[in-house]
Each structure stands twice: as C-alpha cells, then as structure tokens.
Amino acid sequence: MTPTEKPADKDRSGSDEAFLREVDDAVRASDLSSLWTRYGRWLLAAVVAGLLAFGGWIIYHNQVQAAADLQSEEFVDAMDKLRAGQEKEARAKLAKLAQADQPGYRAMAQLVEANLLGEDGETKKAIALYGKVAGDDSLPQTFRDLALIRQVSAEFDSIPPQQVIDRLKPLATAGHPYFGSAGELTALAYMKMGKDNLAGPIFAQIAKQEDAPPTLRSRAQQMAGALGIDTVQLDASRNAASKAGASAAKGE
C-alpha cells in the first residue's frame, strides 16, 4: 500500500465508524419505538393505576381520620351529658358508639355502658357486657384487660376464689399496667381461701408500686399491715440486702 493511500483509508475508517454509530442509534430508536408500540399502553395504564391507588389511599386515610375525630367528639359529648345528668341522651350516643368502626371508642362506649348497668343494679347485664369486651379480639388489649378486671370484680362474691386467681393471673404480676387492681382482687381471693401468707406479699408489692393510685397503695399498705407485713420495714430490709450485695461485689 502506497503512502498516498493512507489518508483515504483513514477517511473511510472514520466514515465507517460514523455510519456504525448511526446504525446503532437507529436500531436503538427502533427498539424503543417497537417497545412503546407493544407495551406503551400497558405501561401507561400501570402508571395511572398506581396514581389512582395512591390517591385512593389518601382519600381513605382522610376519611378514617375524619370518622375518628367525629367519634371522639361524640364520646366527649356523651360524657358531658352524663355529668350534666342527661343520662338518656348520653346512653343513646354510647349505644351508637358501641357499634363504631374505631375499636378504641367502641370499647370505651361499651365499658361505660356496662358501668352504668352496674350502677342501675343490673349486675348480670353488666357482667355479660364486660365479658363481651374482654373476649373481643378486635379490641385493643388494654381495654380487654380492664374489662376482665371489672367483670371479675362484679362477680367476685359469686364465683370460687380460685377462679378469680386463675382468670387474673396474667394481669396480677408486678410490672403489668393493671397489677394494682388485679393484684388486689387476687390477694382478696387468697384471703377468702384462708391463705393470708400468699395475700400479704401481694398487698405489700402493691403498696410499693409508685405508679398505682394513692388510694390503692394506701389501702394495700393497710391490708399488708393487718396481715403482719410492715411495708416500711420490708423496704429497709430490702435496701440493706441490696447494699450488702453491692459491698460484697466490690470486695469490701
């Protein structure tokens, strides 16, 4: 090959590369066009469906929140009417809330109604309603636990003490939010069985539970004292034991 042919070869090589790039670009454009022709409609439909679903979720969320706000206002109004002595109007609102979709207000409405039934002397109906709330899996656990305590309290004198203990066992443990109320009923049941040695320590634990209502703690302290447990002395003994353990761990 002569030197005079080299520039032409270079020009042809550059032209070939440019041509190949154009062909490649054309193929890609053709592929995209073909892809859009085949699937563009479905891709667009998927995007629209996603937007509609998101919009629907926002609307649903807003509706749920609006319903919850309305039920909150209805419950507060029912309580205000009860305090004002307008029991008939209040109970009508509570009956409606007892069928509400929002589980919290549904549970509270039923608990208030059960309490009103108890005050009216309709103990059996109150117990049945408490039992209904306690056994309703769709309600928050805290309301179900409260309903169980109220149910057991209402029928305390009509069921065997051991049944009281067995039913409240999951709640009558130190640290549980309802330990104070459940523990007191459990301790009283032990006393009915003549097991004061088991009742006393429970009363002592309740007396030392700082988050328990003051009246409950005071009552528990009195009961513990009546059963021969000095809660003040018990605390001193525990503190002394704790300090002794800490000293031993330090090697003092």
Image (spheres, rainbow, N blue to C red):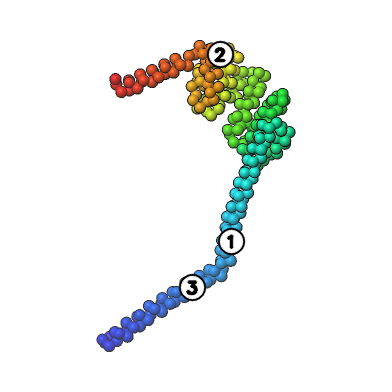
The residue that mark 3 highlights is 29
Where is residue 53? Give x, y as percent: 59, 55
Under tag 2, what secondary structure?
A: loop
- Compute the Cα span from label 2 to label 1: 71 Å
Of labels 3 and 1, earlier in sequence is 3
Q: From the viewer's perspective, is the residue at label 3 or at label 1 nearer?
A: 1
**Label at residue 85:** none
Horizontal arrangement in the rendering, residue 188 relative to residue 121 (left or right): left
Mark 1 burial class by Cα count in 10 Å: few <14, some 14-19, many 20+: few
Asked if the residue under mark 1 is in contact with the one under mark 3, i.e. CB atoms within 8 Å, the reply is: no
The residue that mark 2 highlights is 195
Mark 2 burial class by Cα count in 10 Å: few <14, some 14-19, many 20+: few
| Residue 144 in view | yes
At label 1, the amino acid type is Val
Which sits in the foreground, 171 or 3? 171
Asked if the residue under mark 1 is in contact with the one under mark 2, i.e. CB atoms within 8 Å, the reply is: no
Where is residue 143? Give x, y as percent: 60, 33
At label 2, the amino acid type is Lys
Which sits in the foreground, 138 or 239? 239
| Residue 131 in view | no
The residue that mark 1 highlights is 48
- Compute the Cα span from label 3 to label 1: 25 Å
Horizontal arrangement in the rendering, residue 200 relative to residue 192 (left or right): left
Of labels 2 and 1, earlier in sequence is 1
